[in-house]
Image (tube, helix red, strand yellow):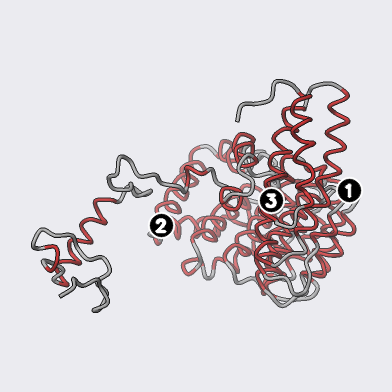
Amino acid sequence: KPPPADSREAEGIIERVTPRLQHANSAVVMSAVKVILYYMEVMSGSGAASADSIRNLTRKLAPPLVTLLNSEPEIQYVALRNINLIVQKRPNILENEIKVFFCKYNDPIYVKMEKLEIIIKLVSERNIDQVLLELKEYATEVDVDFVRKSVSAIGRCAVKLERAAERCIGVLLELIQTKVNYVVQESVIVIKDIFRRYPNRYESIIATLCDNLDTLDEPQAKASMIWIIGEYAERIDNADELLDTFLETFEEEDPAVQLQLLTATVKCFLKNPEDTQDMVQRVLDLATEESDNPDLRDRGFIYWRLLSTDPEAAKLVVLGDKPVIEDDTYKLEPHLLNVLIGQIATLSSIYHKPPEAFVVRAHGGGAVPDMSGGIEEEDEEEEEYEDENDVSGGAGSGGGAVDLLDMGGMGISEPK
């Protein structure tokens, strides 16, 4: 449909569509929201009068979207996936409705996960205390995946809101005190991200983390803790001893843990060369001579060459300032987001992918191209299947059409 000539025409179309927001059919409601969002974009930048109209429309869009969350879980999920896009484009529509996205005890896990994503997108300094109380409660539930996602959400809130970071860390420390294994491990992972977002600010909690080393048995949690030890080795009295405990099982560790151990040990050596000479030699030997992992071997050789030829250059490379991580709440590229907003109430808005990413069209009646480019492989597999199962002749051998309904004697037979 061609765009309207001016904002007045767009406003007229919106007035006609707005009553559909009260419709009983959720698909009609979502389609009406899509149309209104499209024409709101046309009205943007058309003067103060249009700005007032947009504010009024924003208030009108919230109630129907909230009402969709009282439907069956499947409709809730579809609505939440669409709301996820709407919140990224126009967060002010639902900025005062964060409570409706709090999880209920009987919500299916897929609904809970999607609600958490939207909570993170809507969290602000006005509602952070309320959100933290809710997330802390979620972290005590029985579903491990949901608990992990809730703990991760606390960390993402800290990364997003600088003024609330200290409160988020306080909640994470309380969760660590529960000594629940997977809660502690997820907390360590998100605290590493907080350290990367706010370097040299919250090191006082490192001692608490070090007290829980024995509970870490997952690769990502171990790698996160090793990164913290290496990054703040000069502030941890026994950093070399802590790293040494990990080195005892170096060869059995996951590659991510091995890479982090190698880098952390080199950092420790550059900060305290007198006490860690033997340890760095040992880890370089393990990485370059005992490992089959090419990434680990190559990094080991690079560090070895740097340390042996130019230690100052090694300090610049290994101990140099790192870019501060950013909040990843708004993940979609602006162009892709605009495309998906125009696809609300379709499969694209659920997959969060443009239609061409998952819809394949037939060309000229020929074979439908396989998305992975594997038509030839499929043809070969079909031929092998026919050879093995002697699929031949029959109705097709005489030049006639093959009976596609011939399934165990239930096909179409000619009248006698």
- Give residue 151's position: percent from left, percent from top: 74, 63
- At mark 2, the secondary structure is loop
According to the image, label 1 marks what residue? 125
Left of 378 or right of it: where is 416?
A: left
Seen as rendered, the residue at the extreme left is: 398
Could you tell which of marks 2 and 3 lies nearer the N-terminus?
3
Q: Nearer the viewer, mark 1 or mark 3?
A: 3
Up/down of 54 relative to 182, above or below:
above
Q: Which kind of residue does numbered mark 1 sit on?
A: Glu
Mark 1 and mark 2 in contact? Answer it, CB < 8 Å: no
Tag nearer the camera, 2 or 3 = 3
**Which SS class for mark 1?**
loop
| Front position in the image: 110 or 40 | 40
Q: Dot 2 surroundings within 10 Å: few (below 14), some, or many (20 or more)?
A: few
* Residue visible at 63% across and 39% down in the picture: 342
- Relative height, residue 262 to residue 302 (above, below): below
Residue 293: mark: 2
Picture coordinates of residue 214, whole percent (x, y): 67, 74
**Which residue is identified by label 3?**
28
- Measured from the top left, where is residue 241 in percent x and y? 65, 65
Q: Earlier in the sequence, mark 1 or mark 3?
A: 3
Kindly indicate whether the residue at mark 3 contacts the one at mark 2 (C-beta within 8 angstroms).
no
Q: CA distance from mark 1 to mark 3?
A: 35 Å
